[in-house]
C-alpha cells in the first residue's frame, strides 16, 4: 500500500472521528513553530552573546513564556489524542467484531481463527497511529524550522548539509523496504505457527499416543516454522540495527561536514559554525523521532492492508442483515407457524482440504411440520453439508430454499436461521448464557428439562450469573446443549449425531421415549444418525451417498437391517 494512500486514509478517519482534529493540529503546529523557532533563535543569540530586541540582556522571560505556551498546548492536544486513540481502538475492534458476526460461515471458515486473532492485533496497531502521527508532525515542524534557520545563515552551506541529510534518508528508506518484506513473511509464518500450536494443545492426547505424530508435529511443523522465523527475525533485527547505526552515525558525519568542510569551502566564521552545530544538535532528537516513526508506519501500513483485504473478503456478505433483524416488521414474510421447508434444484460445492471439490445436489426435498426425519449415510456422504444448507448456514450456489412457500432470500436468511434450534456435531457450548434464558430453580421448564436429561444431581445452576456450569463429561455437555436448545422454544430442532456419545441406556431412552415426547410438543426434528437399530422410531429416513440422496423413504417401507 502506498504511503500517501495510508496517510490520507488515516487522516480521513481521524477527521471523521472529530471535526476538531485538523483545527487542533494546526493550532499545535502553530504553537510549535513559535516555540521551536523562538527557542532556537534564543539559544543561538545567548551563546553568541547577542541581545534580543525589546528584552535587552534579560531574555529569560521570553524563554519562560515560550515554555509555558508549548506546555499547555501540548498537554491539551495530548489529552485529546488519548481520547481519540482510545475511541479509535474501540471503533476498529467493534467494526471488526460486527463484520465477523455479519459474515457468512463460509468466509469465516476460509479465514481461519488464526488470521482473525491477528486482525484483532492489527486494530490495536492502527489505533496507535494518531499519537505517532502527531510526534511525526511535531518533529517535522522542528526539523523544517531548523533547516530554514540554517538557510538564513548561509544558503550554500545549508544546501550542502540538507543534501547530505536527504542522501542518508534515501539510503535509510531503501534499506527499510527489505525489512518490510521480511515482516510480511513473518506474519504468514505466524499464522501457520498458531495452527500448529492449536493442534498441539487441542489434540494433546492424540499427540501423546503416537511417537510419529508427535515427532512430525514438532520437527516438520513447529521446529521448521520457528527455524525460518528465527532466520527472518535475525535479518529484521540486523536491518533495524544497521538502520539505527546509520541514523546515529550519519549525524556525526553531518557534524563532521560542518566542522571540517564548511570553513574551507565557504569560509564560514566560528560563530556561524557554532550556530550550525548547535542547530544540528537541537534537531537530533526530532530527526531520531522521524526515523523511529518509519518502522511503526510500516506496521500500520501492513495492518491497514490486511484489514482492507478482510473487508473485501466479506464485503458481499457484510450487509445490514444483522441490523434488519431488529427492524419493526423485519422478516414478516416468515412470520407465523411453521408448515414446511422445500429445497428445489439445490447445487452446492466447496473445496476440501485435499483440494478436491465436493458437490451436494438435491432435486426436490420437503420437510413438513411435525415430522421426525433421520438423515444417515457414510462419512463424507454430504449429511453435514445438507444440514448446513437446510439451516441456512451456507447458501446454495444454485436452487432455492423456501419456508412456508416463501423463498429465503439473502435479506431473509437471518430470520430464516432464527427458526431453528441446532446442535451441531462439533457443537460449541458457550460459557455464558447468550440467549438470555431464565436460569433459575424457579423456572419450571428448566427444572423439567434437567430432569428429562438425567442431570438433576449433576448440573450446577449458577443463578447469580444466569448460567449452567459446563464442567461436565462430553455426553453430559451434549445433554446440556439439548437443554439450552429446547429453552429457545423453536419449532424446528436439528441434531447432528447428538446421541453418538450417549451410553446405551440413555440412547435407548432418547430414541424410544424422548423423541416421541418432543414430537408431541409439536417439534419438527431432523436428526443425523448412524444408529440404524432405532430407524423405526422415525417417520422418514433419508440416506446420503456422495452428495446425493440415495433414498428418502417412510419408515413403514424401509427394509430394516
Image: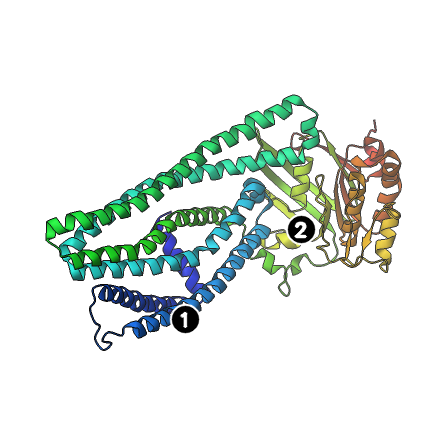
The kind of secondary structure element at disc 1 is: helix
| Residue 18: % across, % down | 45, 67
Which residue, as the protein is rendered here, is positioned at the far bottom? 54
Image position, residue 15 (x, y; %)? 41, 64
Q: How is the image coloured?
A: rainbow
Q: Which mark is residue 559?
A: none
Please tell me how many numbered marks the rendered image carries.
2
Q: Is residue 223 left or right of residue 299?
A: right
- Residue wearing tag 1: 72
Q: Which of 525 and 367 is in front in this view?
A: 525
Query: Measured from the top left, where is residue 360 in percent x and y?
Result: 62, 35
Mark 1 or mark 2: which comes first in sequence? 1
Q: Tell which of 377 and 117 is nearer to you.
A: 117
Mark toward the viewer: 1 or 2: 1
Q: Mark 2 points at which residue?
A: 417
- Disc 1 to disc 2, how far (Cα)? 56 Å
Residue occupying the point 28% across, 48% down: 251
Quadrant of the image occupied by residue 376: top right
Amino acid at each position: 500500500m502506498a504511503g500517501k494512500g495510508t496517510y490520507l486514509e488515516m487522516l480521513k478517519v481521524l477527521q471523521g472521528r472529530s471535526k476538531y482534529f485538523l483545527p487542533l493540529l494546526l493550532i499545535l503546529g502553530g504553537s510549535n513553530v513559535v516555540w521551536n523557532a523562538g527557542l532556537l533563535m534564543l539559544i543561538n543569540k545567548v551563546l553568541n552573546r547577542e541581545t534580543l530586541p525589546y528584552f535587552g540582556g534579560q531574555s529569560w522571560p521570553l524563554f519562560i513564556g515560550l515554555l509555558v505556551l508549548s506546555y499547555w498546548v501540548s498537554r491539551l492536544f495530548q489529552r485529546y489524542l488519548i481520547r481519540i486513540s482510545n475511541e479509535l481502538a474501540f471503533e476498529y475492534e467493534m467494526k471488526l467484531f460486527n463484520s465477523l458476526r455479519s459474515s457468512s460461515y463460509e468466509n469465516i471458515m476460509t479465514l481461519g481463527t488464526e488470521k482473525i486473532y491477528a486482525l484483532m492485533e492489527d486494530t490495536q496497531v492502527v489505533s496507535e497511529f494518531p499519537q505517532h502521527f502527531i510526534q511525526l508532525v511535531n518533529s517535522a515542524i522542528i526539523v523544517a524550522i531548523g533547516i530554514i534557520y540554517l538557510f538564513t545563515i548561509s544558503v550554500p552551506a545549508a544546501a550542502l548539509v540538507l543534501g547530505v541529510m536527504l542522501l542518508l534518508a534515501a539510503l535509510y528508506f531503501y534499506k527499510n523496504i527489505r525489512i518490510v518484506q521480511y515482516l510480511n513473511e513473518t506474519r504468514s509464518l505466524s499464522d501457520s505457527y498458531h495452527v500448529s500450536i492449536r493442534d498441539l494443545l487441542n489434540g494433546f492426547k492424540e499427540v501423546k499416543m503416537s511417537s510419529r505424530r508427535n515427532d512430525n508435529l514438532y520437527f516438520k511443523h513447529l521446529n521448521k516454522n520457528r527455524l525460518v522465523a528465527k532466520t527472518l527475525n535475525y535479518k529484521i533485527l540486523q536491518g533495524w540495527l544497521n538502520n539505527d547505526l546509520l541514523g546515529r552515525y550519519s549525524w556525526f558525519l553531518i557534524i563532521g561536514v560542518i566542522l571540517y568542510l564548511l570553513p574551507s569551502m565557504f569560509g564560514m566564521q566560528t560563530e556561524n559554525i557554532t550556530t550550525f552545530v548547535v542547530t544540528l544538535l537541537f534537531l537530533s532528537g526530532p530527526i531520531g523521532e522521524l526515523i523511529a516513526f518509519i518502522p511503526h508506519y510500516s506496521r500500520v501500513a501492513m495492518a491497514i492492508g490486511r484489514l482492507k483485504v478482510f473487508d473485501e473478503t466479506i464485503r458481499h456478505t457484510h450487509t445490514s442483515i444483522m441490523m434488519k433483524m431488529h427492524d419493526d416488521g423485519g422478516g414478516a414474510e416468515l412470520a407465523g407457524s411453521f408448515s414446511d421447508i422445500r429445497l428445489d434444484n439445490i447445487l452446492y460445492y466447496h473445496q476440501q482440504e485435499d483440494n478436491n471439490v465436493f458437490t451436494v445436489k438435491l432435486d426436490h426435498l420437503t420437510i413438513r411440520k411435525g415430522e421426525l426425519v433421520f438423515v444417515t449415510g457414510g462419512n463424507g456422504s454430504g449429511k453435514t453439508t445438507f444440514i448446513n444448507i437446510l439451516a441456512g448456514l451456507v447458501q446454495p450456489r444454485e436452487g432455492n430454499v423456501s419456508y412456508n412457500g416463501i423463498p429465503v432470500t439473502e435479506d431473509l436468511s437471518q430470520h430464516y436461521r432464527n427458526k431453528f434450534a441446532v446442535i451441531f456435531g462439533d457443537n460449541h457450548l458457550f460459557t455464558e448464557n447468550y440467549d438470555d434464558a431464565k436460569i433459575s430453580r424457579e423456572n419450571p421448564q428448566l427444572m423439567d428439562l434437567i430432569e428429562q436429561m438425567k442431570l438433576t444431581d449433576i448440573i450446577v445452576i449458577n443463578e447469580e450469573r444466569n448460567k449452567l456450569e459446563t464442567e461436565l463429561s462430553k455426553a453430559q455437555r451434549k445433554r446440556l446443549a439439548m437443554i439450552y436448545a429446547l429453552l429457545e422454544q423453536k419449532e424446528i430442532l436439528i441434531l447432528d449425531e447428538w446421541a453418538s456419545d450417549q451410553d446405551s441406556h440413555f440412547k435407548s431412552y432418547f430414541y424410544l421415549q424422548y423423541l416421541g415426547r418432543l414430537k408431541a410438543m409439536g417439534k419438527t426434528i431432523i436428526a443425523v444418525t448412524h444408529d440404524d437399530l432405532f430407524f423405526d422410531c422415525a417417520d422418514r429416513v433419508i440416506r446420503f451417498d456422495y452428495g446425493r440422496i440415495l433414498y428418502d423413504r417412510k419408515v413403514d417401507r424401509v427394509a430394516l437391517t
